[in-house]
Image (cartoon, rainbow, N blue to C red):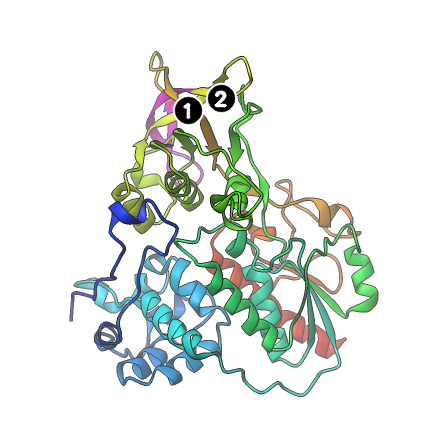
Amino acid sequence: MLARQKMPLQDPGIRRSNFKEVALGYTDEQAVEEAKRCLQCKKPKCVEGCPVEVHIPDFIKHLAEGDFDSAIKNIKTDNALPAVCGRVCPQETQCEASCILKKKGEPVSIGRLERFVSDKELAKGSEVPERPKPSGKKVAVVGSGPAGLTAAADLARMGHSVTIFEALHAAGGVLTYGIPEFRLPKDIVKAEVEYVKKLGVNILLDSVIGKIDTVDDLLLEFDSVFLGTGAGLPVFMNIDGENLNGVYSANEFLTRVNLMKSYRFPEYDTPVRKGKHVVVVGGGNVAMDSARCALRLGAEEVTIVYRRGEEEMPARAEEIEHAKEEGIQFRLLTNPLRLEGDAKNWVTHIECINMYLCEPDGTGRCRPMPLSGSEHKIEADVVIMAIGTSPNPLVPRTTTGLEMSKHGTVVAKENGETTKKGVYAGGDAVTGSATVISAMGAGKIAARAIDDYLKTK
């Protein structure tokens, strides 16, 4: 009961050369055995740790009985994107962190079980619940990322007419352009988006709000607007050499690789520089994704440079472990000072300095300080800056009466209500760069608030 089923994985020596999914998923037998580990607690703490409020023990009980259809139906009453969550949600710090089995052993593999039943359904086709009686109200959702898709799905199930406006040529937001194929296959994202569309949601692609229409314009046609525009504006260190050729923001690099399939160039005509010596600056999931993509593109050596230690790295432990297994090098307690280039302005080296940790900073993490005299250079013909993102200012700049924070995020109440009447917001547009599941939770909360608003309008 204390040891959980291991997830089958591609061999590191093989997967480092392909973009196929790393985790292979449970077999039927493994999934049922894992589900039987659940104690079916009368007061399940795991549910409290789920931002989208999935009734976890209920779906696991169905799974343990071999009733996969009932298990996925149970999940989808609360979560429209279970195949996504089962792959990229950090369950280890949320639902699984509260599992009672963790006190003496390993928690139930809730995320892997969610993935299992989701994949079972996708293999045979998703069932769509009956649509409710139309409310006569119309809602515009700006952005088709996890927050926007969740808000749209919930609002549609409440009977409202929902239209999503997506700026790019494919729906999914960060699920499509930001997370690599080997962690989240694009066919999975497409299937989840199709399910949301089957709920009655209309998705308009290549529709940049702030250009074709403003939020003020949308309010003339729609009864309410939800802003799920994410945080896609890259952040740089503002050090010398960041404008050299071969220097990418992680946002651009991953968009080229994921959405535009540059790893299949020239079949797809958006190339990306395939360096021999690639350095990725940062310690989050985006840094791990960038490094592992660079490796799969043929780099001889990929190095992650991070100014703190491994314990302070915000990336999931699973992603760090997979990166190490694949041969990614880690230069911890190391901070970039400048980038150097050749006569043709191509990056050749990144100069760094060693750091040491002293007292914790405002976030509770140990503050890194430079170690005098420890400057050194690392060879690099590609450098990827993965130190964070901020919200794109286009929508706020073209919207009247919408209060913004000094960090460029939308100011909103806990229920997503903004300072502009009828306009709600959630996800990275409000919090700054965060997790997929937290954005989904914000979309769910905002959907309820919008429903209340429409009932009283």
Name the image quarter holding the C terminus: bottom right
- Label 1 sits on residue: 380
The percent position of residue 415, horizontal first and vertical second, equals 60, 64
The percent position of residue 112, horizontal first and vertical second, equals 32, 66
Q: Are marks 2 and 1 in contact (CB under 8 Å)?
A: yes
Point out which mark residue 130 bears: none
Q: Tell me: residue 8, above or below residue 64.
A: above
The percent position of residue 94, horizontal first and vertical second, equals 37, 61
Q: Residues within 10 Å of mark 2 (few under 14, many from 20)?
A: many
The percent position of residue 97, horizontal first and vertical second, equals 31, 61
Point out which mark residue 347 bears: 2
Give the number of marks: 2
* Amino acid identity at mark 2: Val
| Residue 445 in view here | no
| Residue 229 in view here | yes
Residue at 57% from the left image edge and 61% from the top image edge: 147
Range of the magenta residues? 350-369
